[in-house]
Amino acid sequence: MGKRLVHLLLAVAMAVSAFAGLTIAPAGAAQEVPSGTIYFPWVPNGEEYAGMGPWYSSVTIQNFTEFPVRANIYKADGTKLTSVTFEPWASKSWSSADLFGNGSGAGVFVDAAVGPLTVTRGDTDIDSVSVGRCVVQSVSISQGATVFVQGVDYIWSQTGSRLDITWIGSAPAAGTDYTVNVACDGLLGGVVKMAAPQALISAAWTGTGHESVTGYTSLPVEDVWTWPRSWVFPIIQTNNGWNSVMHITNFGGGNCSVNVDLYQTPTRAGAPGASGPSEGHFSELLAAGETWHIDLVQDYGWPADWIGTAFITADCGVAASVDRLKAAQPWGDPVNMAVTNVAQPTFGNWSEVYAPLVYQNYNGWNTGISIVNLDPDFNNNVQVQFYNRDGTLVHSESLTIPPRAMEWLYLPERTDLGTQGLSQAVIRSLSGLNLAAAVDSVKYTGIDQDVGQATSYLAQQGTRAARPGEGAQNGLLSVALFQKQFGLTAQQDNSGIAYFNANTGAPATVEVTFYDGAGFRVAPTLVNDLVINLPPAGGGILYAPWYGEMPFGFRGSVVLEVTQGGPVACVSNNVNYQVQFDGTATYNCFIREAVDGAVPRPEWTLEARPANAANLAARTVDTDVERFQHTVTAVVRFAGQPQTGVPVLFEILNGSRNDDPAENDQGTYNPAGDDDVVVNTNNNGVASWTYQDGGAANTSGVDTILVCADVNGNSQCDPGEPRQTVRKVWATATVDQGQPPQDAGVVGDNTEDLVLAIDVDPDQLNAGLPLVLRIVNETGGDVSFAVCNQPDRNVQPWFVSADTNVPLYICADPAPAGGTFQVEAYWDVNANGQVDAGVDVPLIGSPVNFTW
């Protein structure tokens, strides 16, 4: 067997080991979630370790909101490096030299706030302002030199995207502007891109002078200041030419006690599925801002062929990352491979995570998945299901993982995944226990400089569309650094995004927008978003070179909004094959959780009808008004469902035509009275009351009736119980012809102008009741309430207190022999001078006929 063949076989064997030891990070770790304060554990600026380097880096930060954000960038010890304002959706990149000059690298953190927002003081106690996707943590308010005090002058609350400011003390004058600053979670996300042995080009680009590229995603504040203060690197390795260098930075005060414990994980050749013994304990007292570097091989002489986990504890807030570096293959061929991960809290993780991008023999790329049981006490039964890009289940694996142990799957050993060798996976604990998973990919075959690539990302959860309602905001996914090759620097960095609808039972829709560094939309999404429809469990790829409209040399960000279904997850690869060895880094998409629309709390409701009613009587002037019974009906519901057996109080209120003057109407049932009653609802939630008009004939009046659901059954209408008042008018209008047609005598046109009058009898009309007359069904000529040389008007509001003739004008040219029309009369309930269907109440049973 020739030497070359031996090397190829060894390379395949090493791939299995490399996947066992490539990037692993706990599922459920929140490192991909944007935050108001974000942390970068280690930002190198010319340091060497593990036989590789010097390492340089850049920090890219994205504003993940639709508002301007003010941010300050600090070293871990609190030294301010710079301040910056991000426009909505904007992103910026700083090289490590921009941040540190010629100084050493360090940990970095960034804090941010939304504002200033200008609010105009209203004339009520509450002012409202939109804060978009900001999750409000605190609010400060000022007006000029005056600073208002929370809890003394104002309090605040948030509903969806609306911030309500309630004034309880001193306040700005109505109509004046004041300033609001808001501290939020969910403002920023960031990534670190690292390269060796030269500084990056223009902060974010790589080229032929580089040998290795790697990177990681920022940590949110809750991952640094977690409680209990315990973190984990699920994979640490020194096998097959790999070395691990941990970087642990104190972001708290001085004299921080930090401890690291290493546990060996048996290999498949030993005892798979068993957690190993503790093999090392390290401790250090860190000053504020200090970074502790642990190079296992060079500093501690750690044995080769070791794979395990590292657990970190501290009594302050720390952030940690680990670089796993492979300078050469065991037989000496240089590869300069590098992967980086952050440490994750050991608590608060998830039992189901998603892998949006899995390779199997795809242009030389293959994938392995490492899965860690984070539970310290119980076995974790784990299922891994693989779906091709069309959403078809193509393979399933079942694993039983002991406490704190790890197992891995290497895809070339499994079934054919189909669909161009690309797939996605759902990793689920059937035991409901926490797990961690990393999806690691390598490329050991190919030509020229595309050989020897290594990359990894964390399996993670996704986000979904929001439930509709007030304040609803769909979930967002975002990539802070997205690049397209061949710009002014002629570099070949390219970004791609793999997205996955992890809902195996329903489709999803995603809308994609590309933004430049200033936050402006970029082609192909200058005007409209890209709309992607995904089948259940389906996936796809966005790859920068595929979009000819996108400008060459683009450096910006991408936002994906889930507008239907979900959860949807995604990751982004950043690759440059000009790099001499490993030019690949992968970043998790930032996740912005959906905010469901406000759902009203289940509540009691009451609907009474008719809301307004009037008599319909004879239309002749001399006919007495007929007196009728009147029925009021109520429907009582809770959470939209009719309720049985609920007492409903009906009470005629003081001043009404049929009020009992002996009663003092206070919404309390009086069994001795005759103007109120309590009726229980039937199986349909309905209660009705019928009463007889007791007024004298030919007189008018109005009854105002309180209808109240007596939910607590105490025979009175209490505050908060659903209620409604309805009105009954005991009168009708009568309409008749008041005088025959006469010449209107209008000068200035050739139209035959006639005027006649209709008589509205006030004796049967409640004084001051607004009336609307309407002309309908005209023949022979136009009939109007306006004179003939004015715009036609067929509706006439009328307030009458005496027997009144209302003029109408008949306009025709030439004058016809005659014609007909009808007049309707309505109680103008809302007093707007119009006839509103369903609101205004007819006062005559049918239109009155007129002939001229």
Image (cartoon, rainbow, N blue to C red):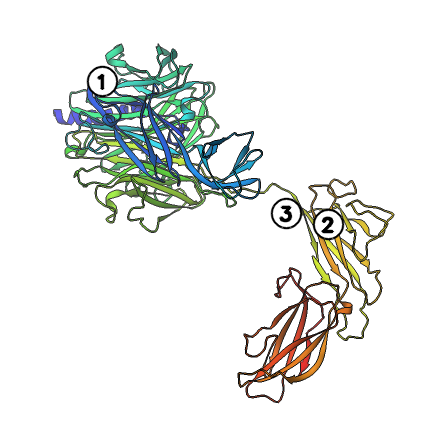
Q: CA distance from mark 1 to mark 2?
A: 79 Å
**Residue assigned mark 2:** 683
- Place of residue 723 in the rendered image (x, y in percent of width and height, measured from the top left): 70, 48
Looking at the rendered structure, the kind of residue marked 2 is Asn
User: Measuring 69% from the left and 57% from the top, which residue is drawn there?
Assistant: 611
Asked whether residue 427 appears in the rendered view, the answer is no
The N terminus lies in which quarter of the figure? top left
Looking at the rendering, which quadrant does residue 588 occupy?
top left
Mark 3 or mark 1, earlier in chain: 1
Looking at the rendered structure, the kind of residue marked 1 is Ala
Q: Nearer the viewer, residue 358 or 623?
A: 623
User: Measuring 16% from the left and 39% from the top, which residue is drawn there?
Assistant: 490
The C terminus lies in which quarter of the figure? bottom right
Mark 1 or mark 2, earlier in chain: 1
Which residue lies most toward the left here? 2
**Residue assigned mark 1:** 50
